[in-house]
């Protein structure tokens, strides 16, 4: 019976460790194209030449589109990603029933507005990035 108790405790420790490790993983919005950064946009987008179809191929569809009376369009992209990291003392949690550790998280916000003329050519764009 004593061996069964040790096996049960070891299994519970393994499950607890797995849960704690998975909570420390980095999370990112799965819909976020990896290329949607200010540097990538500046290297691939040319004002008065790049079309909305090329933008769609490069960065995917926008979160919102507005069509103006003259046929021009404004596209809005917004992406938010979060990451968290931490260090926990797994054995201390398991054996003593208490926790000790450090944890931190950060978030990145990316917003972009693209304005196209009625023929679908990019006339101007604006980018705003924040990290907190």
Image (tube, rainbow, N blue to C red):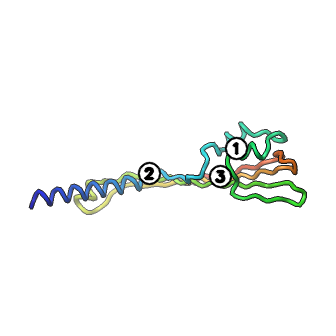
Helix, strand or loop under label 2? loop
Give the residue drawn at x 76%, y 58%. 65
Which secondary structure lies at badge 1?
Answer: helix
Instruction: Check the image and name the residue furthest to the top.
Output: 43
Neighbour class for label 1 at 10 Å: few (<14), some, many (≥20)?
few
Out of 41 and 56, give the one closest to the viewer: 56
Q: Earlier in the sequence, mark 2 or mark 1?
A: 2
- Work out whether mark 3 precedes mark 1 in sequence or the reverse, and give the earlier one: 1
Q: Is residue 1 left or right of residue 130?
A: left
Q: Nearer the viewer, mark 3 or mark 1?
A: 1
Camera-side residue: 3 or 87? Answer: 3
99 vs 78, left or right, is left
Q: Position of residue 3 (x, y in %)?
A: 11, 56
Side of 96 relative to 60 (left or right): left
The disc placed on residue 110 is 3
Which of the 4 image quadrants contains residue 50? top right
Q: Look at the image and tell me in which quarter the N terminus lies.
A: bottom left
Residue that mark 1 sits on: 57
Q: Secondary structure at mark 3?
A: strand
Q: Is residue 120 left or right of residue 112?
A: right
The tag earlier along the polypeptide, 2 or 3, is 2
For label 3, the crowd category at 10 Å Cα-Cα, with few meaning under 14, some 14 to 19 and many 20 or more, is some
Q: Which mark is residue 25?
A: 2
């Amino acid at each position: 019976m004593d061996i069964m108790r040790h096996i049960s405790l070891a299994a519970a420790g393994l499950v607890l460790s797995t849960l704690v490790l998975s909570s420390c993983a980095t999370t990112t919005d799965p819909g976020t194209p990896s290329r949607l950064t200010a540097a990538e946009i500046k290297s691939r987008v040319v004002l008065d030449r790049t079309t909305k179809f090329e933008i769609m191929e490069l960065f995917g569809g926008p979160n919102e589109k507005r069509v103006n009376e003259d046929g021009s369009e404004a596209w809005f992209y917004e992406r938010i990603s979060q990451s968290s990291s931490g260090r926990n003392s797994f054995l201390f949690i398991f054996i003593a029933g208490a926790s000790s550790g450090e944890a931190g998280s950060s978030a990145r916000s990316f917003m972009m507005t693209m304005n196209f003329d009625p023929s679908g050519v990019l006339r101007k764009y604006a980018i705003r990035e924040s990290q907190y």
